[in-house]
Image (cartoon, rainbow, N blue to C red):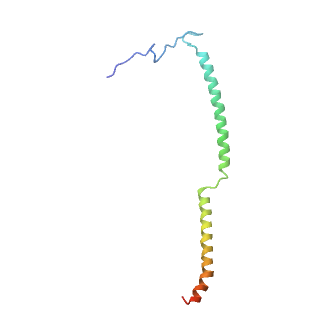
Amino acid sequence: MGTVHDLKGSKYRPPVDGGGDGPHDGGMNPRVDRLERVVERIDGDLTNIKVSIGRIETQMAHVATKAWVMGGAMAVMVALVGGFWWIAQQYLAPILAASGVR
């Protein structure tokens, strides 16, 4: 088994009693005040993040999805292929008929 170390009063765990108002206060009031200020700042930041996410969600509702983009691309491709096929029929058929190829 390992060695058991007593951390009471060591550099890893300073003693709780450091003076102040109560017995074992250790300057608790300034630390709690600082923590309250930090939590208020974090709360404000969290509110800003929620507002930003709400805006992003609203904007994303109007953005095309991959399916819409792919569908549009396929429609354009079909139209282009159809257009080239029509041109080939219009110009190639008379040329082939004139050359006697069936």
From this view, report whether residue 36 is shown above or below residue 52: above
For residue 53, which quarter of the picture?
Answer: top right
Which image quadrant: the N terminus?
A: top left
Kindly identify the residue that appears in the image at 62 percent across and 21 percent down: 34
Kindly identify the residue that appears in the image at 61 percent across and 70 percent down: 80
Outermost residue to the bottom: 100
From this view, report whether residue 50 is shown above or below residue 38: below
* The one of 60 and 77 positioned closer to us in this rendering: 77
From this view, report whether residue 65 is shown above or below residue 53: below
For residue 67, which quarter of the picture?
Answer: bottom right
Q: Position of residue 31 (x, y in %)?
A: 59, 18
* The one of 57 and 79 positioned closer to us in this rendering: 79
* The one of 19 and 83 positioned closer to us in this rendering: 83
Tally the marks: 0
Q: Position of residue 47 (x, y in %)?
A: 66, 35
From this view, report whether residue 73 is shown above or below residue 7: below
* The one of 9 and 94 positioned closer to us in this rendering: 94
Q: Position of residue 36 (x, y in %)?
A: 63, 23
Kindly identify the residue that appears in the image at 60 percent across and 76 percent down: 85
Q: Position of residue 87 (x, y in %)?
A: 62, 77
Which image quadrant: the C terminus?
A: bottom right
